[in-house]
Amino acid sequence: MRILLSAFSALLLLTSCQVPSSVSKEATSPLATGELKVALPPLFAGLEAPTWGAAPPKEETPPAPGWTGPVDDTYTRVKTSKKVVAITFDDGPHPENTPRLLDMLKERKIKATFYVVGDMVKYGPDLLKRMVDEGHEIGNHTVSHGTLSRMSNDALLKELRAAHDQIIEACGVAPISMRPPGGAIKKDQKELMLRELGYPTILWSVDPEDWKRPGPAVVTSRLVNGASPGGILLVHDLHKPTVDAMPSTFDQLLAMGYEFVTISELIKLDEAPAERAAEEARKKAEAAAAGVAAGGTAPPAAPLP
């Protein structure tokens, strides 16, 4: 009798758990239809796809347009063990001074970089063709030689793009670096030009202030005494006394064992990026070793460059 009562009680309990007749037995779960949306707190959201222990992918800095490797946004010189300098000429081309200068360079088999002004290019496009044909490099020095640091970003880019197009039209080769007139440029503008145009900003390590016309002998003395491996020499082929100073300048630097290279060649010789990468790898290795010594688990070491 006691067994029959227990069985009857269990039957009543199961019957009370059934779906009421007023509710459709065909109703589906909101989870199945996607109607129910649950916002998980960050901790649980992270558990949906476990990623702990996995390092985020490293994004490498892509080369700027026209360059085969990453470049800095500014150069005043480079670090190199080679005895090289880059001599750069601004504000031309000049219809009389620049041809004389090109003759001097050709005679000595010296390569230079010319930062040309758009307003001057239109008067001497053939000179740009000659520069390219004789192995020189051409850089962007704006159209109007205005003060870039006072310009908006839009005005700056418009100025440089116009000069860029003028240079291509004159010689068929696009410039891959620029020099701001007077060196007046802001940090965010340098970053903008590198990102949008692929231009590193090229300043200088030696300025003989030839634009003040101190005389050819003074210009030569300042350039020769200021030269050092990896240096960038600034002069202007717009001024006759500057060009008059070049034969002696070239001959003395050549006699001292210097080789003249273009700006792009100089940047390729820069040893600083490799040294920075090696230092970063050393610091990571030391941090990993310290973690192991402290009883932690060290992340995989980055390969040495």
Image (cartoon, helix red, strand yellow):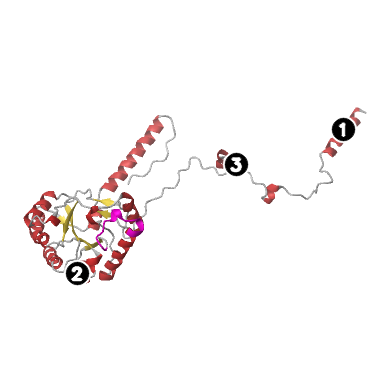
Q: Earlier in the sequence, mark 3 or mark 2?
A: 3
Q: In percent of the image, x 58 and y 43: which residue is there?
A: 48
Pointer 2 residue: 127
Location of residue 79 in the rendering, given as x and y in whole percent from the top left corner: 22, 48
Q: Quarter of the image holding residue 214?
A: bottom left
Pointer 1 residue: 9
Q: Which contiguous range is marked in magenta?
A: 143-155
Location of residue 75 in the rendering, given as x and y in whole percent from the top left corner: 25, 51
Amino acid marked by disc 3: Leu
Q: CA distance from mark 3 to mark 1?
A: 42 Å
The answer to whether 154 appears left or right of 102 in the picture is right
The answer to whether 248 appears left or right of 261 in the picture is left
Which numbered disc, 3 or 2, marks the residue closer to the eye?
2
Residue placed farthest to the front in the image? 150
Most foreground residue, 258 or 176 = 176
Most foreground residue, 118 or 31 = 118
Which numbered disc, 3 or 1, marks the residue closer to the eye?
3
Q: In percent of the image, x 41 and y 41: which residue is there?
A: 300
Which numbered disc, 1 or 2, marks the residue closer to the eye?
2
Q: In percent of the image, x 23 and y 68: which residue is there?
A: 121
